[in-house]
Amino acid sequence: MSISQILEKIFMPRKCILCDDLVEHESSVPFCEECSLEWLSNLDMLCAKCGFDCDYCTCLPDKVREISSSLATFGVFYTPNVQTPANRVVYRLKRDYNFEVIRFCAEIMHKKIIKLCAKHSINYKDFVVTYPNRRRKSERKYGYDHAKLLAKELAKKLGVDVIECFENVGKKEQKALDKTDRLHNASESYILIDNIDIKGKSIFLVDDVMTSGATLNICAKKLIFAGAKRVIPVAFAKDTKPNTSNFNE
Ligand SMILES: [Zn+2]
Ligand SMILES: [Zn+2]
């Protein structure tokens, strides 16, 4: 071990992104031993519709399928309102700035994008990345826009550009609304920035979670309206019980 590695170990201890316990510098995941096991159990979660794990499930909420056919992907499963490790990662991503969390989520999404693109013979280098911005009020409250940081990190990994397309003027959080109100709220919240040039572009639309798919649906439609060639939604986590009527691909 070099002197700089020893100093790093002493002065920059790695902390578990779920519980803040110390993590071995050599560990391949940003979790302590206990949380690593919990994370593995999260990866073992199965889709309530198709019965596959997160690597093989291709079920999408209807609102996402409507805009992207089967071209969308997600990292892991979560269950809304249940304390799964993925929920806890998302909670930290939104409320507690820590670059390790952002990097971890982006890494997982990056792998899934590479896999999706290989399967469909898509060149991801032809894409740009954009994201539905966080509400201004929340950005002020927590001091950052997690969706923006996630999109930037993911774009860096892919070696492509990020284009800022939206402004979020929403008054209400999507999470607080039921399915029917989510579309309406998303439509009013995400406003396209003037003079963005996305004509003919292929876009990865990046968000933290895919629940009803309302945000992704509305933002994708607005991007297409502004001239985008195609939009592929990508989320870090997807509900294990997606709201979908046609889940057999
Ligand atoms: Zn831990
Ligand atoms: Zn499934």
Image (cartoon, rainbow, N blue to C red):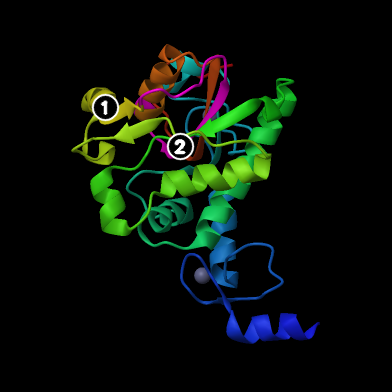
- As drawn, is 195 to the left or to the right of 9? left
Quadrant of the image containing the N terminus? bottom right
Q: Tell me the residue at 67%/74% (across/down).
A: 25
Q: Residue furthest right?
A: 1
Q: Is residue 241 above or below residue 111?
A: above
- Along the horizontal axis of the image, is 99 left or right of 220? right
Could you tell which of marks 1 and 2 lies nearer the N-terminus? 1
Q: Which residues are magenta?
A: 194-214
Can you say whether 86 is above or below 221 in the image? below
**CA neighbours of label 1 inside 10 A, class few (<14), some (14 to 19), many (20+):** some
**Is residue 206 on the magenta stretch?**
yes
The picture places residue 159, in percent across and down from the top left corner, at: 68, 40
Q: Please tell me which residue is depicted at 62% across the width and 27% down the height of the picture.
A: 127
Q: In the rendered structure, which amino acid carries the disc numbered 1?
A: Lys
Residue marked by disc 1 = 179
Magenta span includes 57? no
Q: Is 162 on the left or on the right of 26, as rendered?
A: left
| Residue 224 x %, y % | 45, 15
Residue 164's spot in the image, x, y percent?
A: 45, 34
Which corner quadrant holds the C terminus? top right
Instruction: Work out whether residue 37 or residue 68 is closer to the camera in this orientation and state it.
Output: 68
Mark 1 vs mark 2, CA separation in Å: 16 Å
Name the outermost residue toward the front. 195
Q: Which residue is mark 2?
A: 240
Please determine whether, in this image, residue 224 is positioned above or below residue 216.
above
- Of residues 78 and 134, which is closer to you in this image? 134
Give the image location of residue 56, x and y in percent. Answer: 63, 32
Residue 140: quadrant of the picture: bottom left
Is residue 249 among the parts visible in the rendering?
A: yes
